[in-house]
Amino acid sequence: MKIKKSIYSVLGMCLLFSTQGCNKYLDKEPDNRTEINSVEKVAQLVATAYPQADYYTFTEAASDNAEDKGNGVGTIDDVSTLPYFWKDVIGDDTGTSTSYWNGCYSGIAAANQALESIEKNNLGNGALPYKGEALVARAYAHFMLVTFFAKEYVIGGTNDSPGIPYVTAPETKVVQQYDRGTVQSTYEKIEKDLTEGMALLSATAYKVPKYHFTPAAAHAFASRFYLFKGEWQKVIDHANAVTVGGDYTGIVRPINSTLFALSSADYRAAFTRSDQKYNLLLANQYSVYQRLTSPKYGYGANLVKMFAAGGTYGNITGKAYANKILSYGVPNYTTYKYYEYFFLTDQVAQIGYPYLMAPLLTTDEALLNRGEAYAKLGQYENALKDANLILANTVRGYTATDAATQAKVATFYNTADPKEGIVKLILDIKKAQFLQEGMRWMDLVRNHLPVKHNLFDASGVETTVTLEANDPRRVFQIPEQAKLSGVPLNPR
């Protein structure tokens, strides 16, 4: 199968990190699209319909999950340094926004090819789960693109700023022309694909369901999508559909129990395994993120304090979080969540591609999405119940007396508005829970929050710079080569 290039320039990468069965199929070198003529082949193809690159590197560096560690500390490289200063990265090196753009459109291309093959070959009911998967995967990739490469969706706004090219068919030209549409039209197309696809999904169509959009994973994605749209009841409904009866007991990350008891090496190997109940969707992503052990701008001495007990940086319980914190030498820290795998392309030369098993969707996120939606609807006790379930599985030595209450929230966040306080609580929990997973940037964008970074000058004087909510640099730059397809770049 050969997929032509246009706004995505590294489509071949999408074939490298699929499931073992798909690799075996792709080794047969099928001839363009005519060979994808069976349900089995479509299933193998749609397994590659996921972003093949990570967004951790550039989103974490751009967010307030990074800090300047001081003069003479850490390494400087474009992939982590330029995003910290909210500058555009030139090139498509691993970990850049361009790499992620290419990875998303690679997945979209695979989804479109699968959908076309299903239609042209009349593959019948047996192909419906894979049609559903392709549609939802296409919706997911476009959603991530519009989140990073277009202005944020404004609840109740016109959302008429440029969106991103929504590609729905395999390309037939070397250089295809596209328009960006608007953020509103992009969201409408995402919702259409998501709704149509979810109706076709199956929980039993796959040998390893966690590598595919099952109904549970799709509902988790829908809870994120509608959180961005501000449709709070839909967030709740979809989060409830992730698990039987909407009960998340025993299926969120057991950070202060099972995971805490593991050695660091075992923790790293276990965290993103497909047999973990909290992982709903995993994807192989070309990445060297776990190799960034000591960047000058990253997880440092101030950020590590949010895991400690009490103090300015502590959480509402006053106790420490049990998250794994490892140091490569103070102030260089890591959560050590990822185990790097290696795909050999040359056995003799021992060269190939590093990749991570990345958790794209988790029960923890879906639960906290529901909690935030409850808060927005004024259902404060329900919201606190969801927040406390995460705290109960994250805080060291947690007891019932540590639970967050409206009174504690009012005091801790110094606000008389329970909605404001509980939303802040949930965002703080997510900031710690998903450190080095890229979630924080999405929350900052979605809530139009300013981003503050510290800077040390040559003499060691520390200052603070702020990226305001209306700053055009909050939108990552579209790759330069996209102009060949008539796609205008973002203003600077």
Image: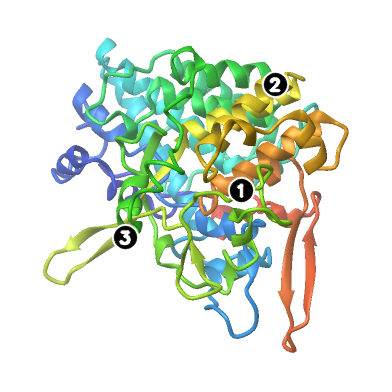
The residue that mark 1 highlights is 319
Give, as a three-letter code, the residue at label 1: Lys
Give the camera-side residue of 200 and 253.
253
Q: Nearer the viewer, mark 3 or mark 1?
A: 1
Give, as a three-letter code, the residue at label 2: Glu
> Which residue does the image show at 25% across and 41% down from the upper left?
1
Horizontally, residue 115 falls left or right of residue 330, namely: left
- Could you say where residue 126 lies in the image, as x and y percent from the top left? 25, 14
Query: Does dot 1 land on a helix, a strand or a loop?
Result: loop
Query: Does dot 3 land on a helix, a strand or a loop?
Result: strand
Q: Earlier in the sequence, mark 3 or mark 1?
A: 1
Horizontally, residue 208 falls left or right of residue 426, namely: left
The residue that mark 2 highlights is 381
Give, as a three-letter code, the residue at label 3: Pro
Query: Does dot 2 land on a helix, a strand or a loop?
Result: helix
Whole-number angstrom distance, CA of label 3 to CA of label 2: 45 Å
Give the camera-side residue of 119 and 74.
74
> Which residue does the image show at 37% across and 39% down from the upper left?
282
- 465 up-or-down from 148: above or below: below
The residue that mark 3 highlights is 354
Q: Earlier in the sequence, mark 1 or mark 2?
A: 1
- Could you say where residue 338 lies in the image, as x and y percent from the top left? 38, 54
Work out whether residue 171 can be spotted. no
- 305 up-or-down from 245: above or below: below
- Could you say where residue 341 lies in the image, as x and y percent from the top left? 28, 56
Whole-number angstrom distance, CA of label 3 to CA of label 1: 37 Å
Q: Earlier in the sequence, mark 3 or mark 2?
A: 3
- 237 up-or-down from 177: above or below: above
Dot 1 surroundings within 10 Å: few (below 14), some, or many (20 or more)? Answer: some
